[in-house]
Image (cartoon, grey):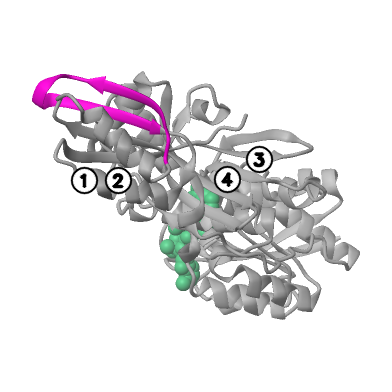
C-alpha cells in the first residue's frame, strides 16, 4: 500500500529522514510491505543545500499538512509554534503524526493525545526522549504490565559530555563547555541543556508514561550543571562516585516525584559507566528488577531511525484503519511535595579545624533529623575542608540543616551541596 509522507522541517533529523525515505524506499517496501512515498518537506530557507532534492522542498507549512497526497505528517521543526498548531491541524484532519519534539510533547502532550484519540489516529514520539534509543515503545507496550517504581535517566548528551570531560580530563566547567561547542555536542546558546530545561521536558514525558502523571516542564524540580565546581567532582571521585545530571521520576506513597539535578552516582552503578554524549535510561520495577537502555541520544542518523520506526507503525495504522499507539492513561495521582521527598546529600564545608567542630555540626544534623553516613576531612587549620554524606532524609530537613550550618561560628562556608543517588540495587 502506498502512503504519502509530508515532513515539517528538513534540518538535521528531517534531512536524514527525507534522504532515507528516498534511498531506502524499495528496501522498506520489501521488509514491511509498505510503499512510503515522500511527498514534500517544509523548510524556511529554500536556498540552503539539503540532504534531499530541492524538488521536494517548500517553505509553506500548509502546503504539506493540507496536501491530499500527504496521509501522514512528520513534525521535525522543534519548538512550540508553529509546530503545535501544525500537529493539531494534521491530527484533526485524521492524519497520524510522528514527532521528535520533546518540548512540544512535554508542554501539550495530554491535549494532543486527546485530539489524536478523538480522530482515532496516533501521535508517535519515539525520538523525543533518548534520540535513537528505543524507549517509548518498551515503556508503553512491552512494560505495560509492570508496576514501575523508578525511572532514572541520563537524557541530555551535552551535559553528560561536559561532566565526563570534567571527571576524566579534569577540565573546568567553562573549558569543557567550550570543547563541547567546538565539537558540535553543545549549541551556541547552551542554556536549555546546561540549565536542565531539556532534561526536564524529557522527565515530564518519562514520568507521564511510567506513572500517568503529566507534570509539565515547569512542574519538574530542576537544577542544572552550570554551578558545578571541579573540586566537587574530584572529591566525588576520591569517595567512589561520579557526578551525572540525572532526571528521576519516582512513584512514592505521597505522590509522584519528578526532578532533574546533578547527582553523585556510585561508580558501581550501571549509570556511572555512561560516558560522553551517550544517553541511558534505567528502569526499576518489582517484577523486572532493573533494566538499562543506552545508546545515541542525538544525531541526525540515529534519531531518523527512531522516527522512521514510528513512520512505519503509523503507515501500518493507515493500512489497518485502527489506531496503533497504546492509550496513554493519565490519572489524578498527586505530584509529591519536593520538600517531603527523601534524598541523600553530599555537603562540602569550609571549616576552622578546632576542637568541637564536628560535634557542633553533627548536633545540627541530629536536631534536624538527618543522620550522617560518612565524613571526610582534607587539610588542617584554616584550610580545613569537611565533606559529609548523609543518609536518606527529607529534602526540607537537609535544607533546614544547611541554613543552620551557615550560622555556626566554626563553619566558614557551606561551599556546595549535591544530591547523592539513593541506590537500592
Ligand atoms: N538533532 C538531534 O539530534 C535530535 C535528537 C532528538 C530529537 N530532536 C528533535 O527533532 C526536532 C528537529 O531537530 P533538528 O536538530 O533536526 O533541528 P534543525 O536542524 O534546526 O531543523 C529544523 C528544521 O525545521 C525547519 N523550520 C523551522 N521552523 C520552520 C518554519 N516556521 N517553517 C518551515 N520550516 C521551519 C528549519 O528550516 P531551515 O533549515 O530552513 O532553517 C529546519 O529545516 C526538534 O524537535 C529536536 O528537539 C533532535
Q: Is residue 421 visible?
A: yes
Q: Which mark is residue 402?
A: 2
**Rendered residue at 77%/73% (across/down):** 117
Asked if the stretch drawn in magenta spans residue 388, the answer is: yes
**Rendered residue at 34%/44% (across/down):** 225
Q: Closest to the observer: 270 or 136?
A: 270
- Circle 4 — which element? loop
In terms of sequence position, does the residue under pointer 1 or pointer 3 come before the other?
3
Q: Label 4 belongs to which residue?
A: 130
Q: Nearer the viewer, mark 1 or mark 3?
A: 1
Q: Closest to the observer: 80 or 203?
A: 203
In terms of sequence position, does the residue under pointer 1 or pointer 4 come before the other?
4
Q: Label 3 belongs to which residue?
A: 283
- Residue 138, how many percent across, how many down? 74, 45
Q: Quadrant of the C terminus?
A: top right
- Residue 131, how many percent across, how many down? 57, 46
Total marks placed: 4
Asked if disc 1 and disc 2 are in contact, CB closer than 8 Å, the reply is yes
- Residue 178, how many percent across, how many down? 26, 39
Q: Which mark is residue 406?
A: 1
Range of the magenta residues?
Answer: 370-389
- Circle 2 — which element? helix
Q: CA distance from mark 1 to mark 2?
A: 6 Å
- Residue 340, how many percent across, how many down? 50, 54
Q: Main secondary structure of the magenta part?
A: strand
Asked if the stretch drawn in magenta spans residue 57, the answer is: no
Q: CA distance from mark 3 to mark 4?
A: 14 Å
Amino acid at each position: 500500500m502506498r502512503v504519502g509522507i509530508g515532513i515539517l522541517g528538513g534540518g538535521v533529523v528531517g534531512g536524514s529522514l527525507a534522504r532515507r525515505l528516498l534511498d531506502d524506499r524499495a528496501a522498506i517496501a520489501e521488509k514491511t510491505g509498505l510503499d512510503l512515498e515522500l511527498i514534500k518537506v517544509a523548510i524556511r530557507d529554500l536556498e540552503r543545500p539539503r540532504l534531499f532534492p530541492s524538488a521536494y522542498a517548500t517553505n509553506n507549512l500548509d502546503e504539506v499538512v493540507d496536501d491530499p497526497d500527504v496521509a501522514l505528517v512528520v513534525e521535525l521543526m522543534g519548538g512550540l509554534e508553529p509546530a503545535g498548531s501544525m500537529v493539531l491541524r494534521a491530527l484533526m484532519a485524521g492524519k497520524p503524526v510522528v514527532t521528535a519534539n520533546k518540548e512540544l510533547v512535554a508542554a501539550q502532550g495530554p491535549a494532543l493525545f486527546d485530539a489524536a484519540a478523538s480522530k482515532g489516529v496516533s501521535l508517535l514520539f519515539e525520538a523525543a526522549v533518548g534520540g535513537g534509543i528505543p524507549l517509548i515503545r518498551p515503556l508503553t507496550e512491552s512494560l505495560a504490565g509492570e508496576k514501575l517504581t523508578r525511572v532514572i535517566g541520563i537524557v541530555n548528551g551535552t551535559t553528560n559530555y561536559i561532566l565526563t570531560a570534567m571527571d576524566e580530563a579534569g577540565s573546568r566547567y567553562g573549558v569543557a563547555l567550550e570543547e563541547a561547542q567546538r565539537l558540535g555536542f553543545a549549541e551556541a546558546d547552551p542554556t536549555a541543556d546546561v540549565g536542565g530545561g531539556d532534561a526536564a521536558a524529557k522527565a515530564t514525558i518519562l514520568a507521564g508514561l511510567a506513572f500517568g502523571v503529566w507534570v509539565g516542564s515547569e512542574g519538574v524540580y530542576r537544577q542544572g550543571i552550570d554551578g558545578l565546581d571541579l573540586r566537587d567532582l574530584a572529591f566525588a571521585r576520591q569517595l567512589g562516585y561520579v557526578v551525572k545530571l540525572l532526571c528521576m521520576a519516582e512513584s512514592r506513597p505521597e505522590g509522584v516525584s519528578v526532578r532533574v539535578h546533578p547527582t553523585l552516582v556510585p561508580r558501581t552503578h550501571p549509570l556511572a559507566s555512561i560516558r560522553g554524549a551517550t544517553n541511558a535510561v534505567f528502569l526499576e520495577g518489582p517484577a523486572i528488577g532493573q533494566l538499562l537502555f543506552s545508546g545515541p541520544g542525538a544525531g541526525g542518523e540515529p534519531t531518523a531511525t527512531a522516527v522512521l520506526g514510528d513512520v512505519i507503525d503509523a503507515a501500518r495504522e493507515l493500512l489497518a484503519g485502527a489506531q496503533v499507539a497504546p492509550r496513554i492513561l493519565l490519572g489524578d495521582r498527586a505530584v509529591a511535595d519536593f520538600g517531603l521527598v527523601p534524598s541523600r546529600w553530599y555537603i562540602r564545608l569550609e571549616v576552622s579545624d578546632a576542637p568541637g567542630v564536628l560535634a557542633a555540626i553533627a548536633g545540627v544534623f541530629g536536631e534536624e533529623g538527618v543522620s550522617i553516613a560518612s565524613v571526610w576531612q582534607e587539610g588542617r587549620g584554616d584550610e580545613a575542608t569537611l565533606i559529609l554524606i548523609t543518609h536518606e532524609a527529607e529534602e526540607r530537613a537537609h535544607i533546614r540543616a544547611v541554613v543552620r550550618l551557615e550560622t555556626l561560628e566554626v563553619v566558614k562556608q557551606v561551599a556546595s551541596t549535591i544530591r547523592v543517588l539513593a541506590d537500592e540495587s
